[in-house]
């Protein structure tokens, strides 16, 4: 898909994102173990910490939301979180566009030299994408809920950006 742009998510766009999470399992895989389900508009915004966390939508030329992600500073890195592609657009390379653009935006905003993320061990499609983008598994220096079900992955932001320019 051409003309994809990463733009700050606006409140009126959240019902689209909410429609991508039809059950508790998918909601908690995406939002974490403390994300409430069933949710309603206000609880959803509270649990995804909008507008506290930088929240972005990958949009096509007509402004339709095709993917979503957030970033924040974690352990001095740009940490990517709550990454999701619209169920109707999966397999079209949008995950790659989302991760690349969000990592570049976040690393620049946070002046970070590395990017990180968590991925569920059972999410093979996401893991494969992240590895293709240069992310590697690393030890996480602490405790978090679900850490026994996730892997922590890192990529240097400069190498990440250079790799994207080559491909």
Image (spheres, rainbow, N blue to C red):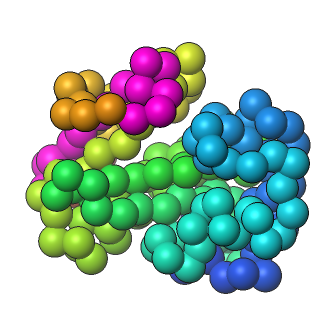
Q: Position of residue 110 (x, y in %)?
A: 23, 72
* Picture quadrant of residue 133: top left
Magenta highlight on residue 154: yes
* Picture quadrant of residue 17: bottom right
Residue 88 visible at all: no
- Left/right placement of residue 111 relative to residue 45 reads left
Up-down relation of residue 137 to residue 74 (above or below): above
Up-down relation of residue 145 to residue 108 (above or below): above
Q: What residue is drawn where x is 67% and y is 38%?
A: 28
Q: Position of residue 101 (x, y in %)?
A: 40, 63
* Picture quadrant of residue 72: bottom left
- Left/right placement of residue 88 relative to residue 158 reads right
Q: Which of these two is toward me, 154 or 63?
A: 154
Q: Position of residue 148 (x, y in %)?
A: 43, 18
The total of numbered circles placed on residues is 0
Q: What residue is drawn where x is 55% and y is 49%?
A: 83
Split into 4 quadrants, where in the image is the N terminus? bottom right
- Left/right placement of residue 87 relative to residue 117 reads right
Q: Position of residue 158 (x, y in %)?
A: 13, 56
Magenta stretch in the rendered image:
144-160
Residue 73 visible at all: yes
Magenta highlight on residue 80: no
Q: What residue is drawn where x is 76% and y is 31%?
A: 25
Q: Which of these two is toward me, 142 or 13?
A: 142
Q: What residue is drawn where x is 16% and y is 63%?
A: 112
């Amino acid at each position: 898909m051409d003309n994809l742009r990463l733009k700050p998510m606006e409140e009126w766009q959240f019902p689209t994102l909410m429609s991508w999470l039809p059950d508790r399992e998918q909601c908690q895989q995406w939002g974490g173990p403390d994300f409430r389900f069933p949710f309603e508009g206000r609880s959803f915004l509270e649990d995804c910490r909008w507008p506290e966390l930088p929240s972005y939508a990958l949009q096509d030329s007509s402004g339709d939301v095709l993917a979503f992600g957030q970033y924040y500073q974690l352990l001095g890195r740009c940490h990517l979180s709550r990454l999701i592609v619209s169920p109707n657009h999966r397999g079209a390379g949008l995950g790659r566009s989302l991760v690349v653009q969000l990592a570049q935006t976040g690393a620049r905003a946070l002046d970070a030299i590395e990017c990180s993320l968590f991925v569920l061990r059972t999410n093979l499609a996401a893991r494969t994408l992240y590895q293709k983008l240069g992310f590697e598994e690393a030890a996480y220096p602490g405790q978090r809920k679900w850490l026994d079900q996730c892997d922590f992955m890192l990529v240097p932001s400069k190498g990440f950006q250079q790799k994207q320019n080559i491909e």
